[in-house]
Image (spheres, rainbow, N blue to C red):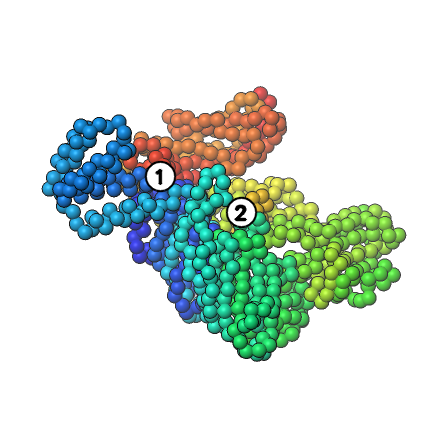
């Protein structure tokens, strides 16, 4: 992994009112970024980027995968907290008093007295006079400068303009970054993350291109929630008309605010074949608090007379619209973009590519055999050729990207599948049972539903008790086909049928439109497979790959989240196993090419289990940049060792309810460095040193299952170093099984003991599993508390998974 280095040109640690103090920060795991705008840029340029998120206080670095990029953080705008507001009011009080005394301005003193008394109506006039005399003594000999006047004005401005209740807390903090992309930076999609000394954010898509870029000015105001009850009422309004002019070819960047309709004008010449492609959902796949759960852009093109000449609200099943238009006459044209139901917010970010750029609309076949060449037919706009030959030699089974180049311009990406099974093409006519194409298993058939209402039929011989799988790969390979698949015997009796099969590994799919059948044949004889489009659609682009074979047990892995933070020597994570064709065996995890001292705890996914928590243990080091990690999974399948890389992913919510595992490019781990305590009893130690000392000493016995009695408690002893008097250690269960809770945790001579109980209504005797116990440390005395006045906490470590068993009372 390559990162660009980021320097903090404003000294934000001091600027953000003590944000560098680790003990005053929110738990770093809560740090999240919701959008980056613009979400890309042209190589060889310098421009401002705005990142919106939450818990960004103490921001120190920005990381982008790949090389050739540099950046500097320039500002951070965030809502004012209750503690900060009180501090500002006290500051204004003090400044007003000092100014009044220095200038001997009794009118100002009376104003100050009235201001003070307005806050405390119990004070009588004599008390007020006494207070003013005390202030004269306090500020005797004080001075008042232009800098003091500016300080007073700034404090008053912050009080007046501070947002107390953000309308959208998840994107209510705004970081601005000056970013420079090198002229030779590689073109393509990257990932952007931000970091504090104690955390690393989730990644967002960031694209580097070749075309000139035009951007609407970023919106930097924080929308305020005006009603705690009517939570849809907020101050932000799209009062500014967005109407810009740009020169093609280009990429246009913008944001859609509530009710917003943006127009972008350009001059074009007769005969130009323009592709106008929007990236919106491609930049931010899912919005947790929006319906639909993404920015659903609509795209219209207008001529110089204001007539709509083209329109799109999607591209086939893809929510991002694309237009192709051949310019009929010289003139000015305009692009209109908006949300389909006039929603909008700062994270409704888009990029529109406009120009005679190459764009692939479909390919055939959708895949090919490993260790062979495959000729692929291309359809699309402004393509330099209608076919390419792919060399799939030395490729392992999987999905690979296809692009074409037209001069210096690169097309969109199309997926191409590679497999080791024999392959063939469907042969028309094969739409009737008496014309069914004869196949021999195992086989992958590359075919097309050539026209509306077309059906492709295939015939094979089977044996009683033979288990077969028939699987369609189409929508997952960017085909518009919405397949339905049926298996019958020779008499037409249906044995199995499937329309949509949900593949959790396809994290960007919201309509799982591919079909899957796994069944056992009841008798010797001839069997038929029928494949068609559910919506009775068809055409040259309705391609598919149909696998018919015995089950091929296999698995895929997803590591969540893709940004990990190690505190106190450990980084907790989760792994999901996506089991294929009936595979139910155990899988062991290991780090590949890991740095010295890095290891996994709880590195086995048990048989028939689809999810576990584990910890990546790391040595205590102060490494400034995140490390890219690679995790592999191993399993014995049919006597062979099968090894697969685990893909990093993030668990994203869509529209308040639906969850998706969306893969990212890299798995990154950052080591929290902590902050420095401010008073002498800390001995000058950093938070990282204190956390590391305690965390490295913490141990539990995870070799023997903890027996939790129904109606009682089980005790888990923890050995650990002593905790400073100003701090306290606590424990929590990460994603515990239903009904299992921590009752309490108490100190002992050698450390602490955790008492675990269970709810008899939610557990049953004999139930087993593993517990992920996380530990935290918080300051309970001293001046360093969070802005709400409550002691903040830092994570220590997550123990290796502790086995448990529920037993009778």
Among the 4 quarters of the image, the one containing residue 687: top left
Q: Residues within 10 Å of mark 1 (few under 14, many from 20)?
A: few
Q: Residue at x 32, y 41 (%)?
A: 84
Q: Residue at x 27, y 34 (%)?
A: 118
Percent coordinates x, y for residue 98 in the rendering: 18, 41
Can residue 305 be seen? yes
Residue 184 placed where, x, y %? 43, 70
Viewed as shown, does residue 716 lie left or right of 519?
left
Instruction: For marks 1 and 2, give the one nearer the viewer.
Output: 1
Q: Quadrant of the N terminus?
A: bottom left
Which residue is painted at 16% across and 47% down in the image? Answer: 144
Q: Secondary structure at mark 2?
A: loop
Say which residue appears at 48% left-offset and 38% top-offset. Answer: 229
Furthest residue in direction left, as rendered: 141
Question: Which of the two residues, 106 or 236, is positioned nearer the viewer here?
Answer: 106
Location of the C terminus (image quadrant): top right
Above or below, comparing residue 77 to residue 138 in the picture: below
Q: Are marks 1 and 2 in contact (CB under 8 Å)?
A: no
Decide: is 768 above or below 560: above
Taking depth in this image into account, of 208 and 212 the one nearest to the observer is: 212
Tell me where residue 656 appears, x and y as whole percent: 56, 44
Above/below status of 602 relative to 266: above
Name the disc covering residue 82, or none.
1
Mark 1 vs 2, N-terminal side: 1
Name the mark on residue 288. Answer: 2
- 765 sits left or right of 161 in the view: right
Where disc 1 sits, the SS reads: helix
Are there few (<14), some (14-19), or many (20+) residues within 10 Å of tag 2? some
Query: Which residue is situated farthest in the front direction here?
Result: 107
């Amino acid at each position: 992994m390559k990162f660009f280095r980021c320097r903090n040109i404003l000294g934000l640690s001091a600027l953000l009112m003590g944000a560098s103090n680790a003990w005053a920060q929110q738990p770093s795991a809560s740090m999240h970024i919701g959008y980056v705008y613009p979400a890309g840029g042209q190589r060889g340029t310098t421009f401002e980027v705005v990142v919106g998120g939450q818990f960004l206080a103490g921001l120190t670095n920005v990381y982008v995968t790949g090389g050739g990029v540099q950046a500097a953080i320039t500002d951070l705008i965030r809502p004012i907290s209750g503690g900060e507001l009180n501090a500002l009011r006290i500051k204004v009080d003090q400044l007003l008093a000092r100014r009044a005394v220095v200038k001997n301005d009794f009118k100002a003193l009376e104003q100050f007295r009235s201001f003070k008394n307005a806050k405390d109506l119990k004070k009588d006039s004599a008390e007020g006079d006494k207070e003013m005399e005390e202030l004269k003594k306090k500020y005797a000999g004080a001075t008042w400068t232009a800098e003091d006047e500016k300080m007073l004005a700034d404090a008053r401005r912050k009080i007046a303009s501070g947002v107390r209740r953000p309308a959208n807390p998840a994107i209510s903090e705004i970081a601005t970054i000056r970013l420079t992309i090198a002229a030779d930076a590689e073109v393509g999609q990257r990932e952007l993350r931000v970091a504090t000394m104690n955390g690393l954010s989730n990644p967002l898509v960031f694209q580097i291109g070749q075309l000139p870029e035009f951007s609407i000015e970023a919106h930097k105001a924080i929308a305020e929630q005006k009603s705690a009850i009517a939570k849809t009422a907020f101050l932000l309004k799209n009062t500014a008309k967005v109407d810009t002019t740009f020169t093609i070819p280009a990429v246009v960047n913008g944001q859609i605010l509530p009710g917003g309709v943006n127009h972008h004008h350009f001059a074009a010449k007769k005969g130009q074949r323009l592709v106008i492609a929007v990236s919106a959902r491609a930049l931010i796949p899912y919005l947790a608090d929006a319906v639909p759960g993404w920015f659903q852009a609509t795209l219209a093109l207008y001529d110089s007379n204001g007539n709509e000449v083209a329109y799109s609200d999607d591209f086939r099943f893809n929510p991002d619209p694309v237009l192709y238009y051949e310019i009929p006459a010289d003139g000015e044209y305009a692009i209109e973009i908006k949300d389909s139901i006039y929603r909008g917010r700062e994270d409704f970010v888009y990029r529109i590519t406009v120009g005679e750029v190459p764009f692939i609309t479909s390919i055939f076949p959708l895949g090919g055999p490993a260790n062979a060449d495959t000729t692929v037919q291309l359809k699309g706009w402004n393509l330099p050729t209608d076919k390419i030959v792919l060399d799939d030699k030395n490729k392992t089974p999987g999905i690979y990207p296809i692009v074409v180049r037209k001069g210096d311009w690169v097309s969109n990406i199309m997926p191409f599948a590679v497999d080791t099974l024999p392959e063939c093409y469907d042969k028309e006519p094969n739409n009737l049972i008496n014309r069914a194409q004869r196949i021999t298993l195992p086989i992958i058939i590359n075919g097309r539903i050539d026209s509306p209402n077309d059906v492709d039929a295939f015939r094979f011989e089977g044996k009683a008790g033979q288990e077969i799988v028939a699987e369609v790969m189409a929508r997952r390979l960017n085909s518009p086909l919405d397949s339905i698949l049926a298996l019958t015997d020779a008499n037409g009796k249906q044995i199995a049928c499937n329309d949509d099969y949900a593949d959790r590994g396809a994290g960007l799919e919201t309509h799982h439109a591919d079909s899957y059948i796994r069944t056992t044949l009841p008798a010797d004889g001839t069997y038929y497979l029928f494949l068609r489009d559910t919506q009775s659609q068809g055409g040259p682009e309705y391609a598919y790959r149909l696998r018919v074979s015995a089950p091929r047990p296999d698995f895929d892995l997803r590591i969540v989240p893709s940004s990990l933070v190690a505190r106190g020597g450990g980084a907790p994570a989760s792994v999901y196993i996506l089991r294929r064709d009936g595979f139910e065996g155990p899988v062991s995890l290991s780090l590949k090419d890991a740095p010295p001292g890095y290891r996994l705890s709880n590195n086995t996914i048990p048989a028939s289990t689809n999810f576990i928590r584990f910890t990546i243990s790391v040595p205590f080091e102060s490494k400034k940049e995140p490390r890219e990690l690679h995790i592999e999974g191993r399993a014995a399948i049919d006597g062979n060792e099968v090894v697969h890389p685990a893909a990093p992913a993030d668990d994203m919510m869509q529209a308040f309810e639906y969850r998706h595992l969306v893969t990212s490019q890299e798995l990154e781990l950052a080591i929290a460095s902590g902050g420095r305590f401010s008073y002498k009893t800390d001995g000058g130690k950093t938070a990282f040193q204190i956390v590391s000392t305690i965390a490295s000493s913490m141990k539990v016995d995870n070799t023997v299952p903890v027996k939790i009695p129904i109606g009682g408690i089980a005790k888990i002893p923890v050995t650990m170093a002593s905790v400073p008097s100003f701090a306290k250690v606590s424990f929590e269960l990460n994603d515990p099984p239903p009904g299992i809770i921590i009752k309490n945790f108490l100190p002992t001579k050698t450390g602490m003991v955790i008492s675990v109980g269970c709810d008899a209504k939610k557990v049953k005797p004999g139930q087993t599993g593993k517990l992920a116990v996380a530990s935290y440390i918080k300051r309970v005395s001293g001046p360093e508390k969070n802005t709400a006045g409550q002691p903040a906490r830092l994570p220590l470590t997550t123990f290796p998974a502790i086995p448990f068993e529920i037993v009778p009372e």
